[in-house]
Image (spheres, grey):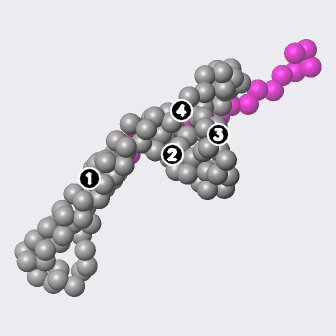
Amino acid sequence: WLDCDREGEAISDEVRTVCIKGNPRLQSQNQIYRAKFSTVLPGEIQRALRSLGRINEHFVQAVKARSEHDLRVGAAFTRFQTLRLQKKFDGFQDSGVISYGPCQFPTLGFVVERWARIETFVPEDFWTIEMSIRLNGDG
């Protein structure tokens, strides 16, 4: 099972490549299909098996192009910001690389947001009531 989005389509392409490498007849017999389902429920899986499709090559190429773009932008910006920060702050020259990636930036935002919530957390009193009941023989 692979996600039903572009990333899943690209991973399907990788799986197809491995399958063809293991059994080249699959490619010549054009026997590779993709099932798409979001939940592991019998009805959903049966529906997916009744509606098998081909891997969407346009989605695969879109993911490959985006990955290439992310890599190039990430590499260029990592170099730029590392050199800039090394010039700006004393003692930073030996600190290594300050990496940038399109996924790192929003993830850093989540981490900072969570850190800020923890820092500003004000505990509140929390009370519980425990009780036991003893019934006589009459119920």
Residue 132 part of the magenta-drawn span: yes
Residue under label 1, please give it.
Answer: 69
Left or right, 88 with reference to 102: left
Residue under label 2, please give it.
Answer: 13
Q: Position of residue 68 (x, y in %)?
A: 30, 54
Secondary structure beneath label 4: loop
Q: Is residue 2 above or below residue 108?
A: above
Q: CA distance from mark 2 to mark 3?
A: 17 Å
Q: Position of residue 89 (x, y in %)?
A: 10, 77
Earlier-in-chain disc, 1 versus 2:
2
Q: Which residues are magenta?
A: 123-139
Q: Report the amino acid beneath label 3.
A: Gln
Q: CA distance from mark 3 to mark 1?
A: 34 Å
Earlier-in-chain disc, 3 versus 1:
3
Q: Report the amino acid beneath label 4.
A: Arg
Observer able to see residue 71: yes
